[in-house]
Image: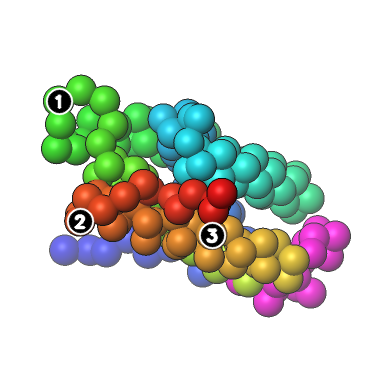
Amino acid sequence: MRLITLSADPEVRLRVYLNDHLAGATAGTRLARRCAKANEGEPLGEAVSRLAGEIEADRATLLEIFDALKLPRARPKEIGAGAAELLGRLKPNGQLIGASPLSRLVELEGLCAGVDAKGNLWISLHHIKDTRPGLSAFDFEALAERAARQRDELEGLRRHSATDALAGSGPAVPREPT
């Protein structure tokens, strides 16, 4: 059996890497918007809606990086990621109709994983920015810090959702004291 290997050309590897992250950003943006809409009118929905805007902005930054590096986008990969996000909606969630607390938990876990990957992307690009003139215009440290803040916020939401889904002991997001 012969293995197919990725090109030894770092430019090709960078293109593949960025396209993989763009596919993830496409799915993550859709997931964040869906989660925000499903929890509209609740503190969780408000928090995720704000984060969804930031996730969309990060995806836009990634598109700017493609332009700056003059790299082609792999549209089939983006389309496939969007389709995978749609298929993810079909997973069993413990009830026949509508979202359940388990849906919220799984969605937040997906967003946590995506934001972790995005943070790693920004750190990786920061480390190579001196080797690619197109990258010098981007503040990857600030982007990585924003991803870390997003991850921390999502983790708090995820923990509350885990308690709600798995122990049934309260709302997915703690309410502000009155």
The residue positioned farthest toward the front in the image shown: 178
Does the rendering let one see residue 94?
yes
Q: Mark 2 points at which residue?
A: 167
Q: Name the residue under label 3.
A: 153
**Residue drawn 45% across and 62% down?**
155
In the rendered image of this protein, does residue 161 appear above or below residue 139?
above
Where on the picture, by quarter, is residue 127? bottom right
| Mark 3 in CB contact with mark 2 (< 8 angstroms) | no
* Residue numbers of the magenta segment: 124-139
**Residue drawn 20% across and 56% down?**
167
Mark before the other along the chain sequence, 2 or 1: 1
Distance Cα–Cα, label 2 vs label 1: 20 Å
Name the amino acid, label 3. Answer: Glu
Name the amino acid, label 2. Answer: Ala
**Residue drawn 19% across and 38% down?**
93
Name the amino acid, label 1. Answer: Leu
Select label 2 or label 1 by which is in front: 2
Does the rendering let one see residue 78?
no
Mark before the other along the chain sequence, 3 or 2: 3
Left or right of 158 in this view: 90: left
Query: Does the stretch in magenta take in 130?
Result: yes
Q: Mark 1 points at which residue?
A: 96
- Residue 109, x across and y down, in percent: 36, 55
| Mark 2 in CB contact with mark 1 (< 8 angstroms) | no
Element type where label 3 sits in the image: helix
- Residue 9, x across and y down, in percent: 57, 66
